[in-house]
Amino acid sequence: MLKLGSMGALASLAGVTSEGVAEAFADAAHPAVPKWNVFELTLQGPSTGNPFTEVELSATFALEHRTIQVDGFYDGSGIYKLRFMPDAEGDWSYTTSSNAPALHGKAGAFHCVAPESGNRGPVSVRDAYHFGYADGAPFVECGTTCYAWAFQSEATQRQTIETLAASPFNKLRMCLFPKWYQHNHKEPPMYPFPRNTEVNDYSTFNVEYFQHLDRLIQALCRIGVQADLILFHPYDKWGYQSMPAEVDDRYLRYVIARFSAFRNVWWSLANEYDLMQAKTAKDWDRYAGILAEHDAFDHLRSIHYCFHQYEYGRAWCTHAGVQDSRLYLGANWRNDWRKPVVFDECRYEGNIASTWGDLSGDAMTRRFWLAAVQGCYCGHGETYLDPNDILWWSHGGTLHGSSPAKIAFLRNLLEETIALGPGPIGYTNFSDEPMGARRDNGSVVFYYFDEHQPAEGTFTLPQGKSYTAEYIDTIHLTRAPLPGEYSGNAEVKLPGTPWGSLWFRQKGLA
Amino acid sequence: MLKLGSMGALASLAGVTSEGVAEAFADAAHPAVPKWNVFELTLQGPSTGNPFTEVELSATFALEHRTIQVDGFYDGSGIYKLRFMPDAEGDWSYTTSSNAPALHGKAGAFHCVAPESGNRGPVSVRDAYHFGYADGAPFVECGTTCYAWAFQSEATQRQTIETLAASPFNKLRMCLFPKWYQHNHKEPPMYPFPRNTEVNDYSTFNVEYFQHLDRLIQALCRIGVQADLILFHPYDKWGYQSMPAEVDDRYLRYVIARFSAFRNVWWSLANEYDLMQAKTAKDWDRYAGILAEHDAFDHLRSIHYCFHQYEYGRAWCTHAGVQDSRLYLGANWRNDWRKPVVFDECRYEGNIASTWGDLSGDAMTRRFWLAAVQGCYCGHGETYLDPNDILWWSHGGTLHGSSPAKIAFLRNLLEETIALGPGPIGYTNFSDEPMGARRDNGSVVFYYFDEHQPAEGTFTLPQGKSYTAEYIDTIHLTRAPLPGEYSGNAEVKLPGTPWGSLWFRQKGLA
């Protein structure tokens, strides 16, 4: 299995599990923790009674005038943990608070140093409609989905990490609960709660289950992939979709306490929330409130629907994570909600009998382009029939389709663009259908022609700037510079092929 | 030029222009006129004054208990004509009525005989959503557009007829007025009204202009193409879009009197009616009323819009002639309006700078399939840049695109299908996007998978019947029988390629 603590500060704490060592650590003089890594404090406390429900533990971390409170969590065998992600270099101190005397009043300090190479910090919303890392670099969201990868064989999990590392995808949607659905009709290797045949013991958690999730989230972090954690979902035979309210809440607080110090965490309240009939609008509000109140690191938050679109304008949502195939609505929604719009699910490349999972690779690629040209983001998934019934969309493993390479090509283009600065983003909706549109940051203007194939056109460029032009075939992945310079209302001769994209780049800025 | 009267009964009348001959004809014993051909009566009458406004002429045709009244028209040089299309075999008689004594009370008869080979009669609505010829054969509408072909060189007009004859297209949208628009910036060779520099003399018609249109409509008839006559349009520099109301009405009655006996006529009140700012809703109602009242042969009637969809549910419309790219709405509209839905304009195959004229051939083909699978019809047009600026969409000439061959392939498939009987037509809208759907006449059920590529699927077939299956690649035009027989909830293995179509045919009916 992927080893807990094999990254950053956690690595140095991996052995800290025996009683007394944590206290010794607390007395150590300023260990070094790279910025946006995890400082983990391990404490020994009561193991009798029900530590999950009876023991309260939190800590307040302080840097100069700032204080941040985080919850601790019970990790079994009398071990309690507190995880903290420092977001500023300097000397941090902390003090614990607990109703258990053994856990109360523990104080200490650490020194937060510069982040190691490749650590850009957590992602948040940038320039209203986009995302960026905490270090200032843009984050060109490019997601995929392996809903139930956490519950597959170790070999498949390792393969999933390897595949992702070689893919264009930098965000992974994954369920925290096991999944029961077509192609997903087997029991998971572990359950989140102790389970006796058909009965869940909701009074405690199965810490091994969550330790495993720790490792997966960190493995994703190591390869630069955001873990978009789906907190609830309806595809369930075990009862997790209809737990008592206090169990839902305790589960959320436990998950927040465990995972929120991992910088690559995003929260998705649910997959297809509207199919979860046991839950009411008030439940979803309450969950959102718990996230907002207890996640000290303010990770990105959204929710995913099936039929009834969520009101993404609501304050708790940091971005929209829609399920829709109408890519051409993206720009309108973006303007309506004033948030980033991610088409987290717009059907998948594959060949299964379900119409949501049988897109051609080029159709999947096209959706990424339609999103990009509107200043939105798209999500990938793959559902090719497999003799071992391992479908990327749920199980992970390997990718078989043609879209990832084409999506990688697009991501590279977008990263070149955004590196020039996000600037004002324009959008031209030419008609009643998805077609040529543009994304404009002043330095780069691009059009996507979709199924259109103009052999010429007039394109209005920002005043006072001179541009070079390049014609891109989004399917055959060719890039051809067009001769000359362009400015004002630029008349351009084009190859007249479908699935093309025209890029104008301000001269001297490449 | 294509010769007037070179078809059917008109041919036998081509020389009947001198005074007295028409009367002699009226005395002739029962000339033979094939059913749905034109019986044309030519009379000599007043040539002084203004025959267009001062002379009223009509005739009543009778067969047994039935009587049908048609208007006559002035054709210049003292010649008046009455045209009649008999729709039943037998001995017809007629009597004229006029305020001009020379034209009044002319009586005669003709014998309507069986139609000649290839003459199936006019097209009307069949089975609520479809079309059929008067002889009972289905008409699989497959239209194209050459708006201004009537005003091009004679060579181009001849070429247009030759191209059409070799194409899959069996309906042509064409304007009766000349067109002024991009790629259409030249004066026509003739004007419909006498014109003195910038001033139209609306008191008379230029009969040569309309004689020329006679010939074109008949030339289309000879090659089996319906002439979808566009009565008004906004792309005009001469004033025809804003004539006085009484001129509009006189023009309509003249056109009806001249053309309505041609069996291949369809009426389209306008192209982009909503761009004609001089006209009000009451004007359009009045025009519709004139058509309904004076067209004795009750040809198909519709209207075409740009931005504001016409209310096609209105009684005068026989079918909807929409301009829209949202092909996936077809089935809904069909159900709303309870009429055939023809996407007369859904953009064109081509490569011009305008987004309405730069679809790839495959994108055009796809639209035909999306219409067909919903039990609707689509319209073609072609706008490839041309060194002589002859674009099929307006001028006719030759076709350059890849879609006509693919559309021909579809039309053949549909004609095979419909020949089995239209039956009940079902539609399955699987989702929020155009995708696999089916058209079902009980004996044939077909699905179109669009950009989806399922490798397997379960398809529900009508109970109690056994089917063979065929997989069709709509782009590469291949047809591959699938092994075995299918019935009930049929599980089918498919090639898993995009742009496929699956056809089930009842065994023993092929």
Image (cartoon, coloured by chain):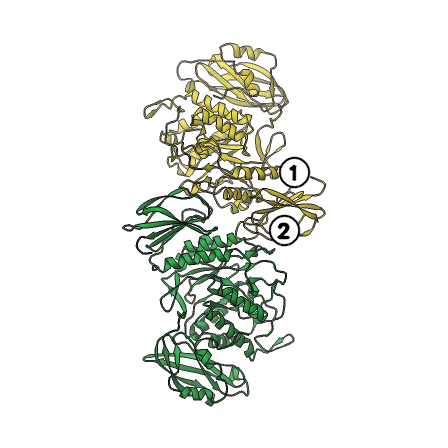
Chain colours: A green, B yellow
| Residue found 53% across the figure and 87% down from its top | A47
Give the residue number, with chain letter if any, for mark 1.
B421
Residue type at mark 2 is Leu
The secondary element bearing badge 2 is classed as loop
| Residue found 64% across the figure and 36% down from its top | B419
Which chain does tag 1 point to?
B
Image spot of residue A8 (x, y percent): 44, 76
Q: Quadrant of residue A121?
A: bottom left
Q: Which mark is residue B457?
A: none
Q: Residues within 10 Å of mark 2 (few under 14, many from 20)?
A: some
Which chain does tag 2 point to?
B
Residue type at mark 1 is Gly
**Which one is in front in this view, the residue at disc 2 or the one at disc 1?**
2
Q: Nearer the viewer, residue B360 or A193?
A: B360
Give the residue number, with chain letter if any, for mark 2.
B494
Looking at the rendered image, the quarter that the C terminus of chain A falls into is bottom left
